[in-house]
Amino acid sequence: MTEDEDIREYREQAVNLPAPTIKVAITQGDTNGIGYEVIFKALEDPQILDLFIPVIYGTSKVAAFHRKTLSIADLPFNYIKRADQALKHKINLLNLTDQEVKVELGEQTLVGGEMALLALNEAVSDIKSGAVDVIVTAPISKKNIQSEGFRFPGHTEYLAGKFNARDPLMFMVSNNLRIGVATGHIPLEKVSESITEKGLFDKIKMMNDSLMQDFGIPCPRIAVLGLNPHAGEKGLLGSEEEEIIIPAIGKAAARNILAFGPYPADGFFGSGNFMKFDGVLAMYHDQGLIPFKTIAAGNGVNFTAGLPVIRTSPAHGTAFEIAGTDSASGDSMRQAIYLACDIHRHRMEWRELTRNPLKVAQPHHTDYE
């Protein structure tokens, strides 16, 4: 699909969305990576500015440096100091500092991490105040962003702390596949001990709620993967399926959540069985992300479900090895922006549909709540 077709398809899908009204905060990410490149390429076609109002959190000098490395058309920048100064049909660049920032393409430096965190903090502050509607984050280096203000393994955990969210769900999304990860960014040796019946039930429920509220799916079907080879072979190859995963699925079913499994991961994806479900819950990071990145083919998006705000990001990293070569694709970043806008619309519709002016008492459940 070409970029023009991509924009046209999104415009048709979002026909009921007043545009451009959604303010999209886009953080610059690590200034030595491909963040600016994928942002600029995602916003290159002027038609896209009819759909939302982009606000890039970065610096004009760093942006100009990266712009010179790219063979793209001139971009309609509007340089601002506050998000409320953003204009429609412009690429608004919120200048975080007038100081000189040293850019070392392809290098992991403290400055690159400091600038990434500065953009994140400002965007979070603005979405808390209502100055922007959604956040799309460009890639960071998990190593060089570590500091007094950032002691997390990634964006997901950082945002959970900022919004007092309990263990949000890393939710990878593409056109034909949605995969959540039960245990997130932890070492493989700690996965088994981190999976509990309550924790797994919470993630199934969180995915179910997100599929309804964020994706507009009224009765989602969720597949839950096993942890062990062949989903444990009824205890022969591991006990987690029998002792933890199956009871959690049963608890979800008792709440009228359409959760099924556990499925062996290899056959599940190899057979195309994933296409029968609205969401898939993997037990650990690579179990979910390897098939996702293989199937999504560069158009995947990382969405953080379970937050009170909307955050998405492209499903790739800083790609230091190609920074400055004009070879990165803006497709995943563009899809991340589209998804953030779609989820914003779905949440507004969900709130309207579920408004309860009579304040009827809702059923109360005690198990795990």
Image (cartoon, grey):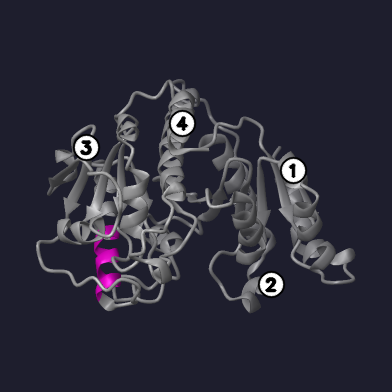
Quarter location, residue 53: top left
Q: Which residues are magenta?
A: 111-120
Distance CA(mark 1)–CA(mark 4)? 35 Å
User: Is the C-beta separation of discs 1 and 4 under 8 Å?
Assistant: no
The type of residue carrying mark 2 is Ser
Mark 1 or mark 2, earlier in chain: 2
The dot on residue 90 is 3
Q: Secondary structure at mark 3?
A: loop
Q: Give SS at disc 1.
A: helix
Q: Which mark is residue 253?
A: 1
Amino acid type at image mark 4: Tyr
Q: Residue at x 45, y 53 (%)?
A: 314
Residue 183 lies, in percent from the top left, at 59, 64
Check disc 1 and give the amino acid type: Ala
Spatial CA span between label 2 and label 4: 40 Å
Q: Quadrant of residue 320?
A: bottom left
